[in-house]
Image (cartoon, helix red, strand yellow):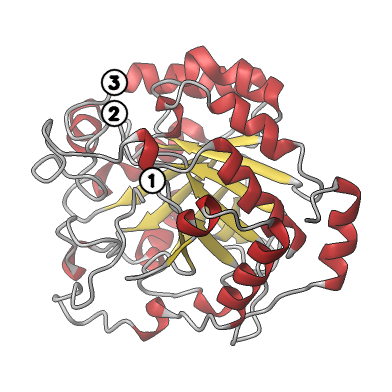
Amino acid sequence: MSTDPENLAEQRAQRPVQDALHRPLHDLRISVLDQCNFRCPYCMPEDHYHDDFEFLRRSQRLSYDEILKVARVAASLGVSKMRLTGGEPLLDKRISELVAGLAAIPGVDDLALTTNGMLLPQVADKLASAGLHRVTISLDSLDESVFRHMSGGRGNLARVLDGLSAAEEAGLQPIKINVVVQRGVNDHTVLDLLEHFRGTGHIVRLIEFMDVGNRNGWRIDQVVPSRHLLREVEKRWPLRRMDQNYPGEVAHRYEYVDGQGEIGFISSVTEPFCGNCSRARLSADGMLYTCLFANRGTDLRESLRSGTDEDELRDVLSQIWLQRADRYSELRRPELAEAHVLRKVEMYR
C-alpha cells in the first residue's frame, strides 16, 4: 500500500489519468454531509426536505479516514484542487480536523470550502489555522426579503455578512461569492449586489440557474443567460475580459475597467464547459460521480469498508476516469421545458 507522502509526487508523474475525451482529473469536490441549515428552493426545497425528512445517518456517511484515503489516491492521480461542500459542511463540528488532514496531502495546492456563511463567524479562524486556503460563500441577494425567500426562510443576512467578514479577517481569500440568478426572483437585485462588493477584493460569480437534481422546479424560462447579465452590467460599469487562471476554469472572468475588482459568469446552460471539465464529486455516502448532472455513480464506500487498500483504490479510480465520457450540458436541449427526463443526483449530494 503506497501511503508514504514521499511517493505521491512520483505516483502523480507516473500515473497521469485522462478520460475518454482526454480531460485530466484535477479537481475533487467532497460532500461532507447532506444536511443543511437553509432550504434554498433551487437546491433543497422545503416541500421535499421538511423537518421529517431522513438524511443520512452518521454510519452511512464516509468517515474522515475514508475521505482522506480517497483524497490521497485522487492526489496521486493528479488532483491538485479540493473543495469541501455539503449540504452545509460547517454543520460538521469537527470539520477543521478534516481540513487539516486534506491540507497535509502533498500536491493539494488549492483547498477551498463552499458555505452559506451562517456558521463562519465562530469557525473561520480555526479553519484557516487548519490549512484551509479560501472560501466560497453562497449569497443570492442583499435584499432582505429576496434573501429570506432564496434561503427557504431560514437565512439571516446579517449573520452571513458577519461570516464573510470573519473569513476575510482570517485570511481565507480570495473570497468568492456565488449568486444563482433566477428570472423574476433575484435578477433585479444583481446590480446592487455587485455595487456592494466592488472594490472589496471579493469575486462575485453570477451563475445561471441549472437543472441540477430533480426537485428544484427548473424551467428554462427562469434562466437568465450570462450574456444578458453581461450586457446589463456593462451598461453601468465597463468590463474587460480576463484570461483563465487555469485550464478548465468554469467561470468567464471579467475585470472592471476602473480597477474595482473582478466578476465571473458561470454559464452551464447557455455556454456549456464540458469540454474542459476536470472535476469529480465524492458524495457524503461514498458515491463517486464524474459529472455534476450525473444520474449514477460508483459506490466507493463498499470498497473502502471491505478492506480495499490504496493501490487497489487507485486502480478503481483510474478505471472510472478512463471510461468517463460525460458531457451532459453540451448534449442538453435547452428548448425543452422537460429537463428531468433522467433522474440526476441532487445538488446537495
Tag 3 near tag 1, CB within 8 Å: no
Q: Amino acid at mark 2?
A: Asn
Q: Amino acid at mark 1?
A: Val
Name which residue lies at 71% across and 75% down. 17
Give the camera-side residue of 6 and 13.
6
Residue that numbered label 2 is attached to? 37
Disc assigned to residue 156 = 3
Give the camera-side residue of 68 and 147.
68
Q: Is residue 261 visible?
A: no
First in sequence: mark 2 or mark 3? 2
Residue that numbered label 1 is attached to? 179
Q: Secondary structure at mark 2?
A: loop
Q: Amino acid at mark 3?
A: Asn
Name which residue lies at 42% across and 20% down. 119
Q: Is residue 115 visible?
A: yes
Q: For marks 2 and 3, give the one nearer the viewer.
A: 2
Name which residue lies at 17% across and 44% down. 45
